[in-house]
Amino acid sequence: MGILTVLWEKWVEFRRDFYKITVAAMISPLMYLIIFGMGIQTTSHGEPYLHFLIPGVVAMSTMTGSFSAIAQNMSVQRLYEKALDQVMVSPTPLWQFILGQVIGGSLRGMYAGGIILLLTMPIRTDLTFNALSLFIMFLNGLVFSTIALTLSFLAKSYTDAPRFTSYIITPMSFLCNTFFSTEQMPAGFRQAVSVLPLSQSAGMIRAIANGEDPGWIGFAILAAYLLVFGLLSMNFIYKKKNL
């Protein structure tokens, strides 16, 4: 019941800010597609560069959509509205509150990624996006929602959330197998970047889009991130409860 309550709150927020959320989810990815995909005529791995770019932008959109849906709101609610204190004294189990937040963030990320899929449908690329692609988008959203939730507990003020975006999300947006392959990076740095969650998500979505098997390693890495940051966020909230 607690999970549904949190999801209902997210749904009300989504309906209230529908146009703002939709426009925000469209602008940056659309600019990337126009400038890099259509403005720069080149190839990647023997295919038009746009074929490489679209799956990467879809994965990136699920990341930014999920992260932004949680990080800013939770920081403000925890520090200024004291909403977390109200949850702690309510009958709602804390794990249900956390799970509801994470699922809600992931669904917001899937919405952002779905917008990119709709925008690129008129482009004839022969790329394939199926139910497994959607599952990877959802899993990627879960990972970055838990990361955002964990970081929101570390925030000292509402200005920390934009800083987290600059320190974590922006570098991953450009480095993690989105705009160019990690294979082109120097040894050592390449391996470090390739195990980041966005690199795995973009690689798996791109493999499916090209009719290839995404393998199981990416799922295992994403599950590991989800477990680690999920446990960290649980630890933070239960630690605060016992203060």
Image (cartoon, rainbow, N blue to C red):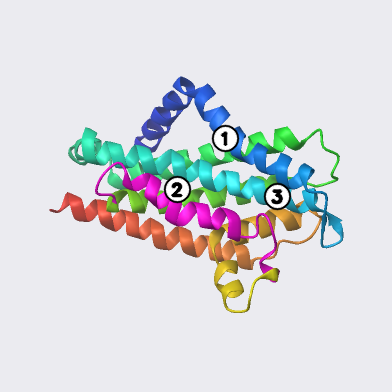
State the residue position of label 1.
25
Query: Disc 1 vs disc 2: which is toward the camera?
Result: 1
Could you tell me if the residues under marks 3 and 1 are in contact, i.e. CB atoms within 8 Å? no
Which label is found at residue 55?
3
Task: Answer with the quarter of the image where residue 191 lies.
Answer: bottom right
Query: Residue 40 in the image: x percent, y percent?
Result: 78, 48
Q: Which amino acid type is shown beneath numbered disc 3?
A: Pro
Give the left or right position of residue 48, taking residue 84 as reference.
right
Which label is found at residue 239?
none
Give the overall secondary structure of the magenta segment: helix
C-alpha separation, residue under disc 3 versus residue under disc 1: 16 Å
Q: Residue at x 79, y 52 (%)?
A: 49
Q: Residue at x 52, y 45 (%)?
A: 64
Query: Residue 182 in the image: x percent, y percent?
Result: 66, 66
Mark closest to the chain's N terminus, 1 or 2: 1
Q: Which amino acid type is shown beneath numbered disc 2?
A: Ser
State the residue position of label 2.
145
Magenta extent: 155-183
Q: Which amino acid type is shown beneath numbered disc 1?
A: Ala
Mark closest to the chain's N terminus, 2 or 3: 3
Q: Residue at x 49, y 43 (%)?
A: 66
